[in-house]
């Protein structure tokens, strides 16, 4: 697993022991997203709303471990199951800072190679904070799917 800043973007790569269809669905299904995106010691997500089509909107809320509630949402740019997913990212904690998230999923013998790129940050501080966030998020996704794969 790797997450790093490359130029103006955050990039990452991780292998997940699940087929691309399952990985894609975990990224877009509200019932799955609420199960894996977050942890008790950081924040939990809830109230996922998804209109899965190019031009469709998405949003969710997050409750921090210390209590604050925030929201994030955006618009889907690319929906190509199970290969590509792109959307805008507009967090309530940084009004006016719209960025974009892009995933590419590739089948490999062990499951799926997930590459992502988050770009369009207005400040280095925001990019640094999101780098820390992505380091957690990508591991949560991997842990969820690999646990799911063992039980299915």
Image (spheres, rainbow, N blue to C red):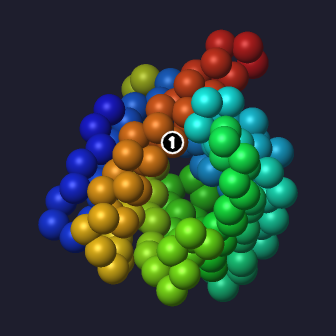
Q: Is residue 57 above or below residue 149?
A: below
* Residue toward you, 129 or 139: 129
- Quarter of the image where the N terminus is located: top left
Note whether 42 is above or below 100 in the view shown: above
Residue at the outermost top position:
150
Residue drawn at x 40%, y 32% is 15
x, y percentage for residue 120?
35, 77
Which residue bears the numbered disc 1? 137
Q: Residue at x 33, y 79 (%)?
A: 122
Q: Is residue 25 left or right of residue 110?
A: right
Q: Name the residue at 75% across, 18% down.
A: 152
Q: Secondary structure at mark 1?
A: helix
Answer above or below: position of 148 versus 70: above
Q: Give the residue displayed 76% in from the left and 44% down from the top.
A: 34
Left or right of residue 148, residue 82 in this image: left
Q: Nearer the viewer, residue 81 or 138?
A: 138
Q: Which residue reaches farthest left?
A: 7
Tell whether 123 sits left or right of 59. left
Tell me: 45 left or right of 18: right
Residue 57, position as x, y percentages in the image: 72, 77
The quadrant where residue 135 appears:
top left
User: Residue 51 is drawn in which quadrant?
Assistant: bottom right
Q: Position of residue 141 (x, y in %)?
A: 56, 36
Q: Nearer the viewer, residue 3 or 70?
A: 70
């Amino acid at each position: 697993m790797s997450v790093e800043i490359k130029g103006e973007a955050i990039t990452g790569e991780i292998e997940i022991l699940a087929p691309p269809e399952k990985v894609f669905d975990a990224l877009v299904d509200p019932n799955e997203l609420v199960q894996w995106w977050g942890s008790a010691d950081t924040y939990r997500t809830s109230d996922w709303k998804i209109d899965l089509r190019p031009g469709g909107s998405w949003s969710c809320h997050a409750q921090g471990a210390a209590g604050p509630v925030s929201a994030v949402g955006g618009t889907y740019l690319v929906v190509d199951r199970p290969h590509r997913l792109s959307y805008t990212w507009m967090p309530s904690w940084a009004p006016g800072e719209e960025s974009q998230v892009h995933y590419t999923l590739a089948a490999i013998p062990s499951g799926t190679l997930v590459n992502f790129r988050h770009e369009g940050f207005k400040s280095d501080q925001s990019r640094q904070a999101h780098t820390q966030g992505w380091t957690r998020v990508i591991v949560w996704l991997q842990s969820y799917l690999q646990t799911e794969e063992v039980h299915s």
